[in-house]
Amino acid sequence: MDEANGRPSFIADAMLGRLAKSLRMLGYDTLFVPHIEDADLKHRALRDRRVLLTRDHEVAESALPIERVLVESDRLEDQLRQVVAAFDLDVASGLFTRCIVCNAPVEPMARERVRGLVPSYVFETQARFVRCPECKRIYWPATHVERARSWLGRVFPDAMAPAEGNAASLKDAAVGGPGDSGRAVRKNLFVTGRPGVGKTTLIHRVLEDVAVTVGGFTTSEIREAGRRVGFTITDLAGPEGVLAHVDRKAGYRVGRYGVSQEALERVGVPALRAAVDDAELVVMDEIGRMELCSEAFREAVAAALDSPRAVLGTIQDRSNAFLDAVRRRGDVEVVRVTEGNREAARTRVLEKIERILASRASG
């Protein structure tokens, strides 16, 4: 329980990170510790008197005297509706009063104190700022908060009050390059760079700062004894498969890895199709040689790029006919990441994707 205002507080399991961020956006104290063991998660809920939110039936059946909710749906909107209904939560009065990244309540910050800490055009055009006392992020009212309000208005059409200019925008004010005012918005944005430079990390950090429905897929390394032996592919809605492995001998090969066309078409293709149908932002991490062994996958990529949906992805820094064709599209922009520009590139990509999403919403 949040003793300061009598509102329930929550702790979410590893599968409910986006739900945790959404509850923080509504102003509810919500812990999210993705790498905690189940036993520690339950004892943390008991110790802190938090409601445990979980997708795991075994965790939900704990004998400990803790309040818990077994979250039933894969869809963020339905998850949020379930929790709000279960506790009759107020979804309007606490909007944007808590940092969605670290969960701390934000504090007002005098405008003069942010000079030099935010881009100059933001300082000149905004009057109100707040700061998270824990992670020091600075927030201000901008298009991002209006998109978040619009999304919440669709999720809770009868409960959301009209916009009155809340204190905080969910936009990280990390210093970056100039904005893109006056340029045509290209709706498909890709990040590229050499292997290991941090492309996927950048994508995940950007996704932490956008409050829209997201779908698509990501890939990640499989490591054994500190050695990379393969890659997984994961649908953001949950399904996962082994995309490539050094022990896989049959079929398509890229370097020392055998690639599973079956996993790509079972996980990646449906993830892209579902994202085009249901999400506001389609994620493709990554488009490279491994992913191009499947014609069905190439068609799903092309369909997403052709769709009205915004696309954010990573693309391999290599040349082949398909990758070159993607890069040459008039609606595609590519941002290069290097070891020296990673933080500036993250800010640049975040600003660009926010502008793309704003253009999609206004369109």
Image (cartoon, grey):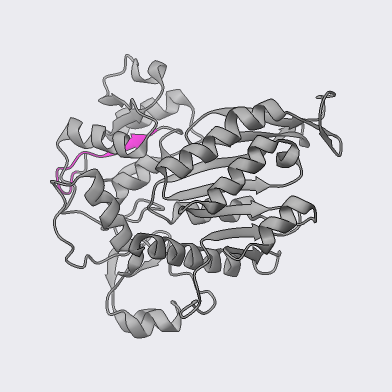
Specify the principal SS of the magenta part: loop
Residue 134: horizontal and vertical position, in percent?
Answer: 39, 59
Where is the C terminus found, in terms of image quarters? Answer: bottom left
For residue 73, which quarter of the picture?
Answer: top left
Residue in front for this viewpoint, 45 or 175: 175
Residue, x 74% and y 58% (percent of image)? 324
Identify the residue shown where x is 18% and y is 63%: 163
Look at 79% across and 55% down and name the residue there: 318
Q: Quadrant of residue 244?
A: top right
Does residue 73 sit above or below 283 in this rendering? above
Question: With respect to residue 360, does 181 lie above or below?
Answer: below
Residue 115 against residue 251 in the figure, above or below = below
Q: Bounds of the magenta span?
A: 3-12
Residue closest to the eye, 254 or 361: 361
Q: Position of residue 260 (x, y in %)?
A: 73, 28
Does residue 27 appear in the picture of this structure?
no
Counting every numbered tag in the picture gives 0
Residue 42 lies, with reference to residue 141, above or below; the image says above
Across and down, in percent, residue 253 comes to 83, 34
Membership of 11 in magenta stretch? yes
Quadrant of res 169:
bottom left
In this orientation, which residue lies closer to the viewer: 70 or 111?
70
The x and y percentages for residue 350 are: 49, 63
Query: Relative to residue 350, is residue 149 drawn left or right?
Result: left
On the question of residue 205 being in view, the answer is yes
